[in-house]
Image (tube, rainbow, N blue to C red):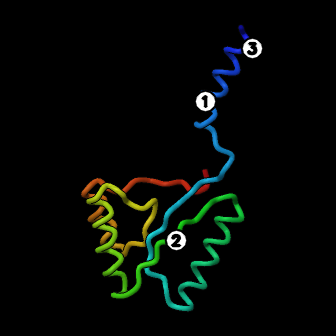
Amino acid sequence: MKKILIALIVFALAPNFSLAGPKIEVLHWWTSGGEAAALKVLKDDFAANGGEWLDMPVTGGGGDAANVTLKARIVSGDPPSASQIKGPTIQEYDQEGVVAPYNIDA
């Protein structure tokens, strides 16, 4: 009976444990050749450390289109894990209470 109970506990908890590294969806506008190459360095480093980078590039507008996309994702309740945001805009998002710390080293 004890073995069955232990097996049931392990089976019940199994979905809560993952051998996979952290997964992060990144909304950004670094889409030109040089920007994309620089971003690839970050992606590769994240992957080399066991993470999975889900890319969400938004082209055009020097970040304006990405900001519109980010706002829409936040309002719909589906924000990305991380986003490239211009400095002053970060404060606006923080004042709205939608900025949260994310430790990608964890």
> Closer to the camera, 72 or 94?
72
Query: Residue 19, relative to residue 82: is it above or below?
Result: above
The disc at residue 21 is none
Amino acid type, mark 3: Lys
Residue 13: horizontal and vertical position, in percent? 61, 29
Q: Which element type, helix, strand or loop, lies under badge 1?
A: helix
> Closer to the camera, 101 or 76?
76
Q: Spatial distance from mark 3 to mark 2, Cα to Cα? A: 44 Å
Q: In this view, does 71 lie to the left or right of 81?
A: left
Farthest residue in the top direction? 1
Q: Please tell me how crowded label 2 is: few (under 14), some (14-19), or many (20+) other residues with Cα within 10 Å.
A: few
- Tag 3 residue: 3
Q: Spatial distance from mark 1 to mark 3, Cα to Cα? A: 15 Å
Residue 96: horizontal and vertical position, in percent? 25, 57
- Residue depicted at 59% across the width and 37% down the height: 15
- Residue depicted at 31% across the width and 60% down the height: 74
Chain-order first, disc 3 or disc 2: 3
Q: Spatial distance from mark 1 to mark 2, Cα to Cα? A: 30 Å
> Closer to the camera, 96 or 27?
27
Q: Quadrant of residue 73?
A: bottom left
Q: Which element type, helix, strand or loop, lies under badge 3?
A: helix
- Residue depicted at 36% across the width and 75% down the height: 86
- Residue depicted at 36% across the width and 57% down the height: 78
- Tag 2 residue: 55
Q: In this view, does 67 lie to the left or right of 55?
A: left
The disc at residue 13 is 1
Quadrant where the image shows the N terminus: top right
Amino acid type, mark 1: Leu
